[in-house]
Image: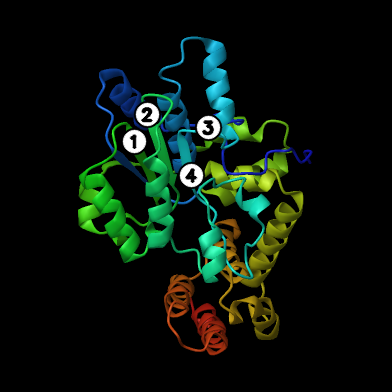
Amino acid sequence: MWKKSRYNHSMPLTDPILGHSPQRAALLDDLKTGNVAHAYLLSGPRHVGKFTIATWFATELLSSDATSEDDQKKVAHAVEHLIHPDLLVLDQLWIEDVCEDFDVIAKTSNVPQQHRKKAGARTDTVGIEDIRILHDRLQETGTGRYRCALIRSAERMQDEAVNAILKILEEPPPGVVFLLTTQALSSLLPTLRSRMRILHFHCLPARELQPLLAGIEAEDAQFLLHLALGAPGIIRLLREDPDRLRSEHSLAAKALSFWQSRSLTERLNLLAPLHDRTPEAQQFLLHLALSLRMLSSPPAANAVEAFHQLLHRLETNASRQLLVQSFVLDLADAEAMPVS
């Protein structure tokens, strides 16, 4: 195993930037040619590095006036620690009974959020007040040519917040560059998408993830590659949290045991976590899907179809416990059918 490092926040400049060379080249070309857009939308799956690239480009923009390597390093340090006066980041939000520690929030966001506490915000949606405060801060005089505003997961924005962003983009303050990320491009209004330059991001091949696996035991490295599915953020999260990695190993073992078992009782017990709609249940479903690849012999086609139907039905409001029971019975029937 590896030692847990001090890397524990969302401004990942201390780690190497992996992959996405075409996207980075396009952004650098915009900067070099003076063709920087007022707003960029970085779209792609979770944890593939969209926000990392957004932060990197913000650093490039904010250091474009730097006249020495030492000045560039100072800018990078200020960006990483969210203390650069021309950088505004809206990432983690204050949520009642969920995330109320401003010291934790300050590791990823530097836009004031006291209004959320006053209003008793209970979701992670970005509201109009969040955008208004961001807008007010953007009216302040900058120290350089550019000012950057980063918003993670733009799909979190309420309609009023989207309209507020659109109004800003109609007459953007000079030198302000918005960098938004999303994993649900189709959920964003076409009017918003049309006002932004869109960059598409994809999962990385295993060879590009190798730098993240240095110093890790071979078994854990292989497991991380298996679980990450090309997303470097997954590897970063798990390498920094050995307890969570052990939990993922446990879920993977239970998922594999489920497919290998032929006992109805054992299978029902193993699927008990799915009875509730929780993040843990979603993660277990992922392991159930991934463990299909680990079977010594492929499952019957009907068994795979039954699992796909379970995934679809669990998105409805039907009783999850009854759906799980029905799935286990359907799976037993599928496995009992003779191979033609």
Q: Which residue matches tag 2?
A: 146
Disc 1 to disc 2, how far (Cα)?
Answer: 6 Å
Give the amino acid type for the residue marked by disc 1 in the picture: Val
Regarding residue 156, the answer to whether it shows in the image is no
Q: Quadrant of residue 217?
A: top right
Circle 4 packing at 10 Å, graded few (<14), some (14-19), many (20+), is many
Circle 1 packing at 10 Å, graded few (<14), some (14-19), many (20+), is many
Disc 1 to disc 4, how far (Cα)?
Answer: 13 Å
Does label 1 or label 4 sit earlier along the sequence? 4
Does label 1 or label 2 sit earlier along the sequence? 2
Looking at the picture, tell me which residue is in the foreground, 193 or 77: 77
Q: Secondary structure at mark 2?
A: loop
Quadrant of the image containing the C terminus: bottom left
Q: Which residue matches tag 4?
A: 89
Disc 4 to disc 2, how far (Cα)?
Answer: 14 Å
Q: Which residue matches tag 3?
A: 84
